[in-house]
Image (cartoon, rainbow, N blue to C red):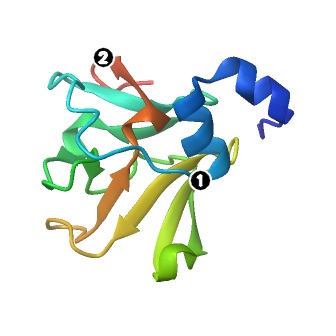
């Protein structure tokens, strides 16, 4: 189910930083979300709660943002071309609510070769075995 809210509703729900990142395509400072647990679990969209990534696919890319080698099974993650800041990148967003999550790059580990570089403020960690 697609989630649609007014700008005022998003502002009321989210912290100023989460609003800027997820609704205005901002970016948080690197190395500000190293506090995610290392226990089994999954990562949900902070805007709508959709399951996006699994802890088993998280790795330390050294870039300062949470990085994942793939999305969760059937995760509502879409891609679009981002030409901002004089670069050509692939933006990733939640297809349930339109939240900007970060970018995906082709420099990740095997077997996917992908690095989903995600703003930590766009994610909420949920501990558990990952089963829905």
Of the residues tagged 2 and 1, which is closer to the observer?
Answer: 1
- Sort mark 1 into few (<14), some (14-19) or many (20+) by Cα contacts within 10 Å: some
2 or 1: tag closer to the N-terminus: 1
Q: Position of residue 74 (x, y in %)?
A: 50, 48
Q: Which mark is residue 25?
A: 1
Q: Position of residue 53 (x, y in %)?
A: 38, 41
Element under disc 2:
strand
Number of marks: 2
Label 2 with label 1: CB-CB less than 8 Å: no
The answer to whether 43 is drawn above or below residue 89 in the figure is: above
Q: Is residue 12 left or right of residue 110?
A: right
From this viewpoint, is residue 105 visible?
A: yes
Residue drawn at (86%, 33%) of the image: 6
Question: How far, Cα to Cα, is label 2 from label 1?
Answer: 27 Å
From this viewpoint, is residue 50 visible?
A: no
- Quarter of the image that includes the N terminus: top right
Residue drawn at (29%, 76%) of the image: 106
Viewer-proximal residue, 66 or 49? Answer: 66
Q: Which mark is residue 73?
A: none
Q: Determine which residue is flagged by label 2.
A: 127
- Quarter of the image that includes the C terminus: top left
């Amino acid at each position: 189910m697609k989630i649609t809210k007014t700008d005022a509703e998003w502002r009321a729900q989210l912290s100023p930083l989460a609003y800027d990142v997820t609704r205005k395509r901002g970016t948080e400072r690197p190395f500000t979300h190293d506090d995610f647990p290392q226990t089994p679990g999954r990562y949900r969209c902070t805007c709508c709660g959709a399951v996006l990534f699994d802890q088993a696919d998280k790795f330390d890319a050294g870039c300062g943002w949470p990085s994942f080698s793939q999305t969760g099974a059937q995760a509502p993650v879409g891609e679009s071309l981002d030409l901002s800041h004089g670069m050509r990148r692939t933006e990733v967003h939640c297809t349930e609510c339109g939240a900007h999550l970060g970018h995906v790059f082709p420099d990740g580990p095997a077997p996917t070769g992908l690095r989903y570089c995600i703003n930590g403020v766009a994610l909420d960690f949920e501990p558990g075995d990952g089963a829905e």
